[in-house]
Image (spheres, rainbow, N blue to C red):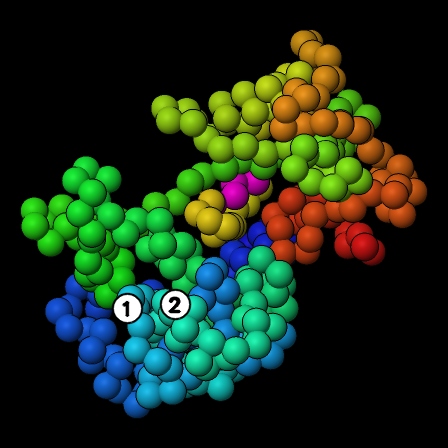
Amino acid sequence: MSSPLTSRLPLARHQVDRDYLTRERDGVVDELLASTSTRVLPVWRGRTLMASAGALALLPAASVPAADDYVYLGVSKDPAAAEPVGTPVLAALLDDERARSIAPDEAAWGSPRVSGSELSARDAGLAVEAVAVANWHDSHRFSPRTGRRLVTDKAGWVRRDPDDGHEIFPRTDPAIIVGVTDADDRLLLGSNALWEKNRYSLLAGFVEPGESLEHAVQREIFEESGINVVSPRYVGSQPWPFPASLMVGFRAEVDADDPGTLTPDGAEILELRWFSRDELVAGLGEIVLPGRTSIARAIIEDWFGGEIDQ
């Protein structure tokens, strides 16, 4: 059974069977493009074509310009969707010219980072899958070993060196994000150097090689805030393909025996503040919290005890 927090992670939802065995079949993309039952999701610059603010545009293959790369996303499992259960879906990764030929207005293209909370579970799952793999294609066009241009294989899930056959697979970079509380159950929020001055969120960072998730929690919190934490507890995760992260959510408490000294690192984090629930409500006119699509917002509201009106 899903926890209340997990159920509030917009980009962790899905109603898609990724149908990984079909990826292995030679010529499957051509088969799917030739089928009138296939639907194609155009993808351009990390965005998907939208039918409306809350729905992806899934088009017949004949309506979409030929793409250099396609990704087989799987089959729909949503009985409430316009397309029947079992409908196969391809992502078409379009260049500027082809994207503008079907939707010249940039407003027709949406990022799941913005629209994710408005999408159905099926469309949210398709959007993050498509954008994640499209971002990987954009950043892995050439072999890191030889510099040769790679070709697409396995229905868009592999890039292969045509000379030596070496295969490269999509990667995901895990990052932890932590709701830290003190003995008074106040929540620690920080303002990042890259954000506008009044934006606050949870502390987060990438997991380093050879490091457990729990160690990453303790290291990142200390590095960014000077605070020692104990008892990291996993609370949920969601993909964040901007460009290739998996956000792994935790709660942790300040170490009562060795709390450390609250000090922003001055590089990534410029300001740190403890908030009680009353203080957070009182500060909503002054500070900006993370958007509703983010796991940060879900963890903050889980601590708060309900939705925050901002």
Residue 285: x %, y % from top left:
89, 47
Sequence-first tag of 2 and 1: 1
Dots 2, 1 in contact, CB < 8 A: yes
Q: Is residue 85 magenta?
A: no
Real-space Cα separation, disc 2 to disc 1, in angstroms: 8 Å
Residue 196: x %, y % from top left:
74, 41
Does dot 1 land on a helix, a strand or a loop? loop
Instruction: Classify 4 as above or below 123.
Output: above
- Magenta-colored span: 246-251
Q: Write down the residue under mark 2.
A: 95
Residue 268: x %, y % from top left:
63, 28
Res 111 → quadrant? bottom right
271 vs 139, left or right, is right
Res 106 → quadrant? bottom right
Give the residue furthest to the front: 97
186 vs 159, left or right, is right
Instruction: Classify 50 as above or below 190.
Output: below
On the question of residue 1 being in view, the answer is: no
Type of amino acid at the residue the image marks with label 1: Asp
> Dividing the image into 4 quarters, which one contains the C terminus?
bottom right
Q: Write down the residue under mark 1.
A: 68
**Magenta segment, prevailing SS (helix, strand or loop):** strand
- Residue ID at (89%, 37%): 279
Does dot 2 land on a helix, a strand or a loop? loop
Instruction: Classify 13 as above or below 61.
Output: above
Q: Is residue 250 magenta?
A: yes
